[in-house]
Amino acid sequence: MDFTALHFAIRELHALMRIPTPWICAAGAGLILGLLAPFGTEDTLSLAMRLFYWVFLACLTLFTGSFVNCLMRSFTQRFPPLPHPGGIAVVALVGGAIGAAVLAEVFFMNWLVFGLSPLRRGYTVPIALNTLAISIVVNGLITWVTDQLSQDSGSRAEAAPRPVPALINRLPLDKRGDLISLSVQDHYVEVTTTKGREMVLMRLTDAIREAGGGFQIHRSHWVADGAVTAAQRKSSAAEVTLSDGRALPVSRTYLPVLKEKGLLPR
């Protein structure tokens, strides 16, 4: 078990729990399904039970799907995005994993509520195929829409378009701002932008390569060009203050870099 990936998934899921919109949408979808009563649930459940069944199932599968997606992201960050064939394979893989987890919950819920055994002839295979197919398609659509929104947002944000660092595309939409700094945190790199912070599972050297303009100030820290608002000597080393108010240490090895940038006297 990769406990760093598990920790990352739990942290991401905890952040999702604080956002009401996905849960409101899931509950709304459950209410609609409860009223429409698909798959013969009208004949076996009362209206109140149907509404509870579908709302609970919608929220449960959202929770599980989000957790599996976050867990898989830890292992698929190095793969290219859509429409690259590698990106398509990753979308299918993640969608299939989400579908398998959701399928287990659907089987359990139907066994608990309706007494339907997963081994029942003519029942297991159709539900399995439908669930897996829907999960892969939905995951693909969400991934594609997210990429498109990211590109549109980037193009509207600046009158003169400039290349977006590859590292930015690894971040959630709400964290995709201008880079400020990169810092090592265990096996992760903490990426700080003007819109917040995000932990990315990768090496600092790889993150720096994808970040674009900037410079390293410490074996564990990198800052973007223009992100340093002040610098001062600290004994044999130094310290910089960033545009977001944070202070980061500068090791002696990287003092010449600050002098070349004009941030410290020569």
Image (cartoon, grey):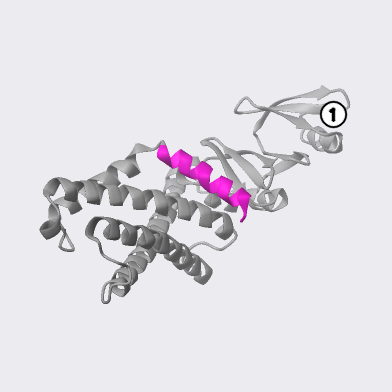
Does the magenta portion include 14?
yes
**On the image, numbered disc 1 is attached to which residue?**
237
User: Residue 156 appears at what percent x and percent y?
Assistant: 42, 45
Residue 174 magenta = no
Residue at the spot 69% in from the left edge and 51% down from the top edge: 203
266 shown above or below 45: above
Residue 78 drawn at (x, y percent) = 60, 60
Q: Judge left or right: residue 86 versus residue 142.
A: right
* Quarter where residue 127 is shown: bottom left
Residue drawn at (64%, 33%), measured in percent from left and top? 227
Vertical order, 199 against 235 (above or below): below
Picture residue at 57% right of the left edge, 63% below the top:
79
Which residue sits at x=62%, y=50%? 3
Q: Magenta stretch?
A: 1-17
Give percent across and percent down for residue 218. Answer: 78, 38
* Residue 136 in which image quadrant: bottom left
Q: Quadrant of the C terminus?
A: top right
184 relative to 96, above or below? above
